[in-house]
Amino acid sequence: MGKAGRFACIFVPMGLTIASLLCLLLVFLGGLSKSNALGSLYFMQLDASNFTANPDLSAVDFTDIDDQFLDMFKSSFAKGDLKDFYNIYIWNYCDGTADDKSGDKTIDHCSSRQAAYWFNVKEVWGMDGAALADHFPKALDDGLKVYEKVAKFMFACYTVAFWVTVAEIVVGILAIFSRWGSLCTTIVSTAAGIFVTAAAITSTALFATFTGIVNTSLKPYHIHASMSTKMLAIVWLAVAFNVGAGFFWLISTCCCSGKSDPKHKKTTFAQRTPYTYEPLHDHHHAGGAVPLGQMGPGGAYKGGNNAYEPFRSHA
């Protein structure tokens, strides 16, 4: 099939690998600016636009309402530390205001970006004082501790997955020339698939759990948390693209060798030199040549194993 066929054979896995890389890039671009496009690429959103200083006691047991904790909320709300919403990304968070009539949300501020970021609501809401530690809901406090640890692992998985996918594209260029290149690319693709899948599972489980904790602990105060279906779709598309690429890379190790088709090779013939002899063959029979082995004495041969074959001269 040749190099053209080989190129066509790896076109699909290369395209899927690039698509997976673009999905991972969108994860890292989330929260990069206050624009609506990048601002909407969050993992989780906390909506505090309906915060109430008079908690709904029917929503939870009375013992879950801590007066001191409620005072902390009132203080944060009065100082303007409690924003209408918070978008949580892999690098940072952004907050803003929501329009009372339309409900449209506008991002006003984004925090600085840092590796292994985790959203510390105590710090963001100004509730991280030592004197207030005992009044913070225990379930939310425990959830934040787990979130901090898992967020580091999640960030590492996404980072490794991104760079290994880049390596997969670079090594994939070698697959154009041979099946060995496809084999090497398949190995790199498998590593990328492991880290992309681990990152997707970790982030989905982490924010699903944290969302549930926030909704349970802060429901009386009308603070609601939700996950982004857009980001979930992007993350799991990265997994699907990477797994698909790995499958087709594997297929390319046993298909489309890249070598030229033997049928299309040019056949070379030896150039005959003038004044040389070539043996007479049976196909000269039809032209009147004496059959081999049937000439008598005086210039021919009698036949049998001791016969000599006459030669024809080419001038």
Image: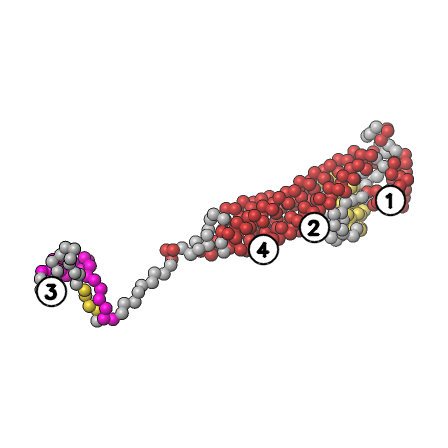
Characterize the local packing of mark 4: few (<14), some (14-19) or many (20 or more) Cα atoms within 10 angstroms: few
Q: Position of residue 191 (x, y in %)?
A: 60, 46
Please state which of residues 243 and 125 is positioned toward the viewer in this rendering: 243
Which corner quadrant holds the C terminus? bottom left
Please state which of residues 172 and 104 is positioned toward the viewer in this rendering: 172
- Distance of label 2 from label 1 (alpha carbons): 27 Å
Horizontal side of residue 24 vs 308, given as left or right: right
SS at circle 4 = helix
Reading the image, the residue beneath label 3 is 299
What residue is at 23 percent from the left and 71 percent from the top?
A: 275
Q: Position of residue 4 (x, y in %)?
A: 47, 56
Reading the image, the residue beneath label 2 is 28
Colour pattern of the rendering: secondary structure
Reading the image, the residue beneath label 4 is 170
Check if mark 1's residue and mark 4's residue have beta carbons within 8 Å.
Answer: no
For marks 3 and 4, the one nearer the N-term is 4
Q: Nearer the viewer, mark 3 or mark 2?
A: 3
Give the residue type that dot 2 points to: Phe
Residue 146, visible in the rendered structure? yes
Horizontal side of residue 226 vs 16, given as left or right: right
Q: Nearer the viewer, mark 3 or mark 1?
A: 3
Characterize the local packing of mark 2: few (<14), some (14-19) or many (20 or more) Cα atoms within 10 angstroms: some
Reading the image, the residue beneath label 1 is 126
Which corner quadrant holds the N terminus? bottom left
What residue is at 75 percent from the left and 42 percent from the top?
A: 149
Residue 36, visible in the rendered structure? no
